[in-house]
Amino acid sequence: MAEALLRVFRGDKDGGQSVDYKVPLAPGMVVLDALHSIQAHQSPDLAVRWNCKAAKCGSCSAEVNGRPRLTCKTRMDSLPLDQPVTVSPLKSFPVIKDLVTDVSWNYKVNKKIPAFKPQPNVEWKMDQRDVDRVQEFRKCIECFLCQNVCHVLRDHQKHEAFGGPRFFVRAAGLEMHPLDGLSRTSLLKSELGIGYCNITKCCTEVCPEEIHITDNAIIPLKERVVDEFYDPVTMLFRKLRGS
Amino acid sequence: MTSSYETHEHDVLIIGAGGAGLRAAIEAVAQGARVGLICKSLLGKAHTVMAEGGIAAAMANVDKADDWRTHFCDTMRGGKFVNNWRMAQLHAQEAPDRVRELEQWGALFDRTPTGDILQRAFGGHTFKRLCHVGDRTGLELIRTLQDRGVELGIDVFMECTVTRLLKDGDRVAGAFGYWREQGRFVAFKAKSIVIATGGIGKAWRVTSNSWEYTADGMALAYEAGAELMDMEFVQFHPTGMVWPPGVQGILVTEAVRGEGGILRNKLGERFMEKYDPKRMELSTRDVVARSIYTEVREGRGTEHGGAYLDISHKPAEYVKKKLPSMYHQFKELADVDITKGPMEVGPTCHYMMGGIRVEAETAASTVPGLFAAGEAAAGLHGSNRLGGNSLSDLLVFGRRAGKAATEFAAKSSSPNFDPAQLADAERDMLAPFESVDGEFPYPIHHDLQETMGSLVGIFRNEEDLKKALVNLDALKPRLAKVRIDGSRMFNPGWHLTRDLKNLLLISEAVARCALARRESRGAHSRIDFPGYDPEWEKKNNIIVNEGGAMALHQRPVPEIPAELKQLLEEKK
């Protein structure tokens, strides 16, 4: 039977090394299947997160041959199998063990964003076209691949000052909700640091839900921040009002 | 007393953070309780995200004639009248409000041309009733509830597994568990507990369920003395993926058929004409699953042992818009473009109708202070659940459980538990590290799945079920000696040793109930007893722990009041 060689990171916060495993191939096999095979037959304590196995829950994120991927959606036959398939944990978050990382920072950022608040006394009718725009953002499965690949987080570790693409997507979904009554532009400018994003579109490239993160979420939000805080007319008005 | 363990104290402790657990938590906080919410995975990953087709609620946005009465009748008829009628009534009456509430919290459903929530057709529902968001309704529901829960400041304990309920005399007093991450133990003290842990899908190999669904809540409740009910009723969803092998069992939403998908065998015959000419593809799940299974068994299956499900007669853009995740799932995992050709599908274990026996109004189990909602509870769906009735179940009875658990807590003093319970629970968890001659858990799990798949599947008979019980018995000593390598830190093998105990225990309950019910009804099909037995229409099977031994009894199905009985007659 044909085999693949997987080179999987084994270790914890104190370090570790890659370990090679030979795994028998099956038609249509995905990387997560190969990891499960290692658990069942070679190393029962290999740590990996997963749930739905159908690209709907965003649990099984890892870096396959250096690229951030959902392992449940990455077919073995899409990879060059004449060389080892490397599987390593997301780089932007601290390793807990093997392929499991500490993503709790994301949950902390999420808490900063005020939830949906309907406009008062609004009639509960919406046009599908307005809903379409927001539904794109609500497709997000929180796999955090966009957070992992964003260089503001990955290379510059601005976790304290920057919210990251996932939370710009969430904020966009709220800001563009046809019936929402709050404004989150001040939060986006200050605490979520949207200004750090220089729209390199790395997040859009890795999104398994194909959300146009940069074009449809981040750029329109940046425009709102500019309109509110940097528009000369508004600035003058604000100065005159003394606010 | 609990000084050696990290201990948390709440009024209401909720185990499980899918739709039912989150909705219960939201309600309990709204009623003023201090709430703790525990989940085995990260928040927002529970299997509710896999619900695709929609939420059933008689809002009458599309079909004006719909109302709760028709929804009630559909649910009772789908469940073949062994449902708890009061649960079916409350569910049908309250579902529309629960959906509207979701929109108040930010959910965005697909719209009708007049701007209301759009509803689609589904199996067994008389009218277009399922509120939906393309084919990712469950994600919308869980994310909305998650955001609401976070906004309300619920204490969430992620990646934490409860292994035992603690008692103070008859009543519940808390829970013992471990953090998956570090493997440290943790104790929770609570005045009341809501179980919302879902089902037992991982007892079958071909399943739509993830690793989490190991009957934990049912086993915890059983061991704490609660009654389980109707465990023979396991739903096999008619349409799971069958090829390639790695994706076998992954759900193919019923919305494909709701949107007009047609089932054919390898001869090109639209075989549902034989089995249910009136409702065809939109017959109930038990019927469609048996039909596909029969076609395959009689040699008319597809290349990989399934049926063809075809939606490619609809415009490609429409399919991509209404079934986006199906489109991607097949394209990426099976190299099939569903806008151009048919999918191959076959039955997959999907849902447990049985579970913890609860009171309709309060979701209270038979143990004081212990409540249950969602798939972990029994009663609403009878012998077969209609598609779309699960998401509405989570919301209606999640809310009711949260409310009743808060009321119970408000009337109760702070409980105490004997530290010996904690020490015993800890010993249980550490045993696999000390075992020397045992085997790893994976082969045991494999053998359990083989038994349940081949002997307690869609079609059953006495001989198979008896054999299944013998096989399950033989797994017990193997599991008692189970061994594990490595440390306590995020060790999936170790976690499985514990989950397997729940699976084995509750699989036995399933097989015992299936053996006892000598008739075919809903999802329970006995080859040796192929027809309905009117006597069994009056009985629910009950499983209870009697001094450490599993006992089986029957209870009468609650009698339907005259006016509802008449309604069922009228809407026949």
Image (cartoon, helix red, strand yellow):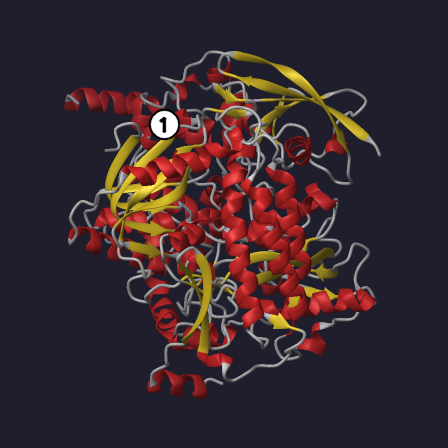
Asked whether, in this view, residue A82 is left or right of residue B445, the answer is right
Q: Position of residue B404 (x, y in %)?
A: 25, 57
**In the shown orientation, is residue B338 left or right of residue A59?**
right
Please state the chain letter of the residue tagged with numbered disc 1 in the rendered image.
A
Whether residue B357 is visible:
yes
Q: Residue at x 79, y 25 (%)?
A: A81
Residue B281, image x, y percentages: 64, 69
Rendered location of residue A113, percent (x, y): 33, 32
The quadrant holding residue B190 is: top left
Q: Is residue B233 visible?
A: no
| Nearer to the camera, B480 or B506 | B480
Q: Secondary structure at mark 1?
A: helix
Assign the N terminus of chain A to one quadrant of the image: top right
User: Circle 1 sits on which residue?
Assistant: A109
Q: Position of residue B123 (x, y in %)?
A: 56, 68
Within 10 Å of disc 1 (Cα), the crowding (few <14, some 14-19, many 20+) is: some
Classify the position of the C terminus of chain A by image quarter.
top left
